[in-house]
Image (cartoon, rainbow, N blue to C red):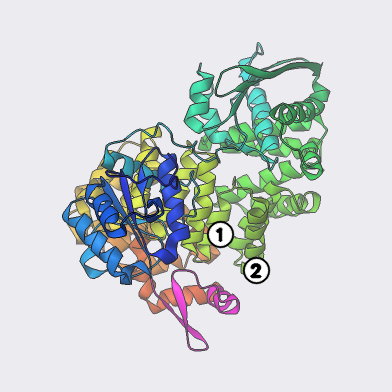
Amino acid sequence: MSADKGKSLAAPDIFLSYNREDAARAKHFADGFAAEGLEVWWDVALRSGEAYDEVTEAALRNARAVVVLWSKKSVVSRWVRAEATLAERNKTLIPVTIEQCDRPIMFELVQTAELAHWQGDPGDPAWRTFAGHVRDFVGKGSAATAQPVGTAPDQVSIAVLPFANMSDDAEQEYFADGISEDIITDLSKVSALFVIARNTAFTFKGKHVDIKDVARQFGVTHVLEGSVRKAGNRVRVTAQLIDGATGGHVWAERYDRELADIFEIQDELSEAIVGALKVRLLPSEKREIENRGTRNAEAYDHYIRARALRASMDFGNLAKATDAYRDAVRIDPAFASAWAGLATIQQNLGLFTRPTEAERAEITRSYARAVQLGPDQPDVAALRLLRSANAFDWPAVEEGIAYFVERGDNNWSVVSHAMLALGRAQEAVEQQSKVVRSDPLSLGGSYVLQHNLSCAGRLEEADREFERCHEIHPTASATVWQALVRAMATRDHDRVFGLYASQLGSGMEQRQPYARDLVAVKDDPAAALEVIREALTDPQLQFPLHLTSLAHWFAYYGDDETVLAIFREGPSSEQPLHFMQEHWQPGFARVRQSTGFKDLLRDAGLADYWRATDRWGEFARPVGEDDFEIIA
């Protein structure tokens, strides 16, 4: 039911308690709960002539849940305090913070959701988690009438399933994947469309699925599926667009062409889909779709092969991907995306390897060529943002962030990395939430969101996101590490080593070869410090990912000086950005209070940038004319 139909509810699912000056925010919650199929009472539901006190008290006492919206206004409201007190007594209280404020002291120990950032988006991960908790609380665990996750009720949206490889050669799988990925990329450029991102769509690769189930799962109106057959110099692409609600065919086409015509096929296919969906394709969007960066089919073949190898998340494939990118730019030296791919993959290898001087020079050349050829392309802009952050060029970082925010392009986690490096954790959470909304099954997207939530101090939300992701990716050690780091911050020793021990024999132990030794002495701080100090001398562990992992252990066992020493390695590493965003993890809160940490921020130019822009974020504030203090 609608949240404002004017119907009085004697026993509503939810009684909404708020201050009248927060009415606009309260309406977001009322509408959101109504969209979840929940009956909501708030004071606009009063009929003319009804006695306010009697109706309000009846609804308050009979509600299955009382959702209290804490703000600077409501914490001093006698009405809201009284409603919260009665709800706590009746065990129906569900508090939520909609603004940073000091809650009444008697409610400080009550678990409170953090939704200060939420402005009514039904797909926001934090809202989805909170709404699910409320549904469970009132006994309506399934949201039968909930709006589709990530999309407005009337927005046209689509999931592009991986096209099947119909070639006789199984090795051509990468080509079918490349076509699928490019269609996703093309459609994502259409502002009138919401498109499920590549990582989530590709979880259905090789599976027989019910199209209506897929549409229902992702809340999309349409699903595209198809196949690719490549044989010699010929290629056949078949595609069909299906209505997600009925399962009926909306449009279908088959393209039989020379391989050299693959780009024309992609252009025609994307435009036909947009036409069938009856959404508007702006002239600028059409030009961007048709700008494929190359018209050389052989260079394109190497490029999509490199992209597939890189997406495999297999370290052993990264060298092969690098070679394939090199082949692409050798064949077409004007292929900006291939240059950007080559520079990006080599730059990211610096997280766990040390490039040679020749490789560093190649990264610089590749980057310069990509910027020269495609300065306005998203992949080039993402690379430029990464390199600006690694160089501590904060004005350029701000420009890079603005580029993606203004475009509404939510496919790049590097944007939230940069926001976090600047100390703007809440902003980073909001940005990464958009990434996860379009790519809800992505392991990497969830990993970054958990990291950002932790840095923002929203540990319970981070843990809920971990549970969601872990259910999808039960064998992934990366997100387990994020959960473990949060347990370190709260000094939950049993959880720390319960999670750590569960990963012995997994990918985490490969990254932390000292894991078994550390588990064996976990209850002896002196012995544990001896283990990690020895690990710190291992030449194989002198790279950013390894060093920051060790920093967490040193902080946990109280050696703050070594943590600072590790942080000082950041600027001279291959990935200073990695260290800058890791600084803000909750387990390093004590380290951040040191003079040495402030010196690190000064040396990085961050303190001067904060003062010049007056954008101090959540972790620092100015003191006098030339000093600052860390406040979180």
Residue found at the very far front of the displayed protein:
49
| Kind of residue at disc 1 | Ala
In the image, residue 348 sits, relative to residue 477, either above or below, namely: below
- Residue at the disc numbered 1: 418
How far apart marks 2 and 1 lie (CA) works out to 11 Å
Q: Position of residue 536 (x, y in %)?
A: 37, 58
- Residue at the disc numbered 2: 395
551 displayed left or right of 318 = left
Figure quadrant of residue 271: top right
Q: Position of residue 290 (x, y in %)?
A: 80, 37
Q: Is residue 442 magenta?
A: no
127 displayed left or right of 616 = left
| Element class at badge 2 | helix
Tag 2 and tag 1, C-beta contact below 8 Å: no
Give the camera-side residue of 410 and 330: 410
Q: Position of residue 346 (x, y in %)?
A: 62, 47
Q: Which residues are magenta?
A: 605-632
Figure quadrant of residue 500: top left
Quadrant in the picture for the N terminus: top left
The structure residue drawn at horizontal position 57% and vertical position 78%, both measured from the top left corner, is 608
Answer with mark 2 or mark 1, whichever residue precedes in sequence: 2
Residue found at the very far bottom of the displayed protein:
625
Q: Position of residue 280 (x, y in %)?
A: 74, 38
Give the camera-side residue of 578 and 403: 403
| Element class at badge 1 | helix
Residue 108 appears in the rendering? no
